[in-house]
Structures are given as C-alpha cells and as structure tokens.
C-alpha cells in the first residue's frame, strides 16, 4: 500500500502536524517504509496464541524479598568522593 500526497496531508492534519509541500516526498517514503514493516508482521504465524489486551492479565514473577548488602560494597564505594570504612562519608548538614 503506497500513500499518496493527499493521504499524507490528511494524516498530518489528523495528527495536528504541519507538513510543508517540500516535506511530502520524504515523509511519504518514511510512512511507506513503516507500512512495509507492518505488512511483514502479517506473515508471522500466530496460531495458538491468545490475544492480549494488556499486561494486567499476566501474573508477575516474584522473587524472594531478602535484604542483602549487594555483595560488592567495594565496587559501590569506589565511586564515593569520600568514605569512612564501609560507608559513604558526607559533610555534616545540621548544627
């Protein structure tokens, strides 16, 4: 499916985008390229795949809620401008 300049002007109008006449040809190539990719999706075999209307229908995978120090404090503290032992050192802000 190739888009003609009239259709591109209508799409731009619906999208509230101002398109000058000299921009119609490049925009036509871009939109036709996008439509080509969409047409390729029609070739994908989706037999046995149930339609999905949103991510809310899927159950999220949960991990154990375990408190750890991350396992590599030296790597983390290597970015600190100042440190005191295994902690970040910050200037005193309350008198």
Image: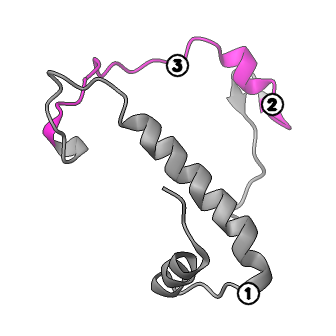
The answer to which of marks 3 and 1 sits earlier in the sequence is 1
Q: Which residue is mark 2?
A: 79
Q: Which residue is under mark 1?
A: 20
Instruction: Give the total number of marks visible in the rendering.
Output: 3
Residue at the spot x=35%, y=27% of the render?
44
Q: Secondary structure at mark 1?
A: loop
Mark 3 or mark 1, whichever is nearer to me: 1
Quick one: quadrant of the C terminus?
A: bottom right
Local SS, label 3: loop
* Left/right of residue 82 with respect to residue 27 in the rendered view: right
Front-most of residues 22 and 12: 22
Q: Give the x, y percent position of residue 62.
A: 25, 23
Q: CA distance from mark 2 to mark 3?
A: 16 Å
82 with respect to 63 (left or right): right
Q: Within 10 Å of the Cα at label 1, are there few (<14), some (14-19), or many (20+) other Cα atoms? A: few
Cα–Cα span, label 3 and label 1: 58 Å
Per the image, the residue denoted by label 3 is 69
Tell me where residue 52 sits by quadrant.
Answer: top left
Above or below, 13 against 59 in this view is below
How far apart are the two marked residues, 2 and 1, measured between alpha carbons? 50 Å
Magenta extent: 57-83
Q: Residue at x 55, y 82 (%)?
A: 6
């Amino acid at each position: 499916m190739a888009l003609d300049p009239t259709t591109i002007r209508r799409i731009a109008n619906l999208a509230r985008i101002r398109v000058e006449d000299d921009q119609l040809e490049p925009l036509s190539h871009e939109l036709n390229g996008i439509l080509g990719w969409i047409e390729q999706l029609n070739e994908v075999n989706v037999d046995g795949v149930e339609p999905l209307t949103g991510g809310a229908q899927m159950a999220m995978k949960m991990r154990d809620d375990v408190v750890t120090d991350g396992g590599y404090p030296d790597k983390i503290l290597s970015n600190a401008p100042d440190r005191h032992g295994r902690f970040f050192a910050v200037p005193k802000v309350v008198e």
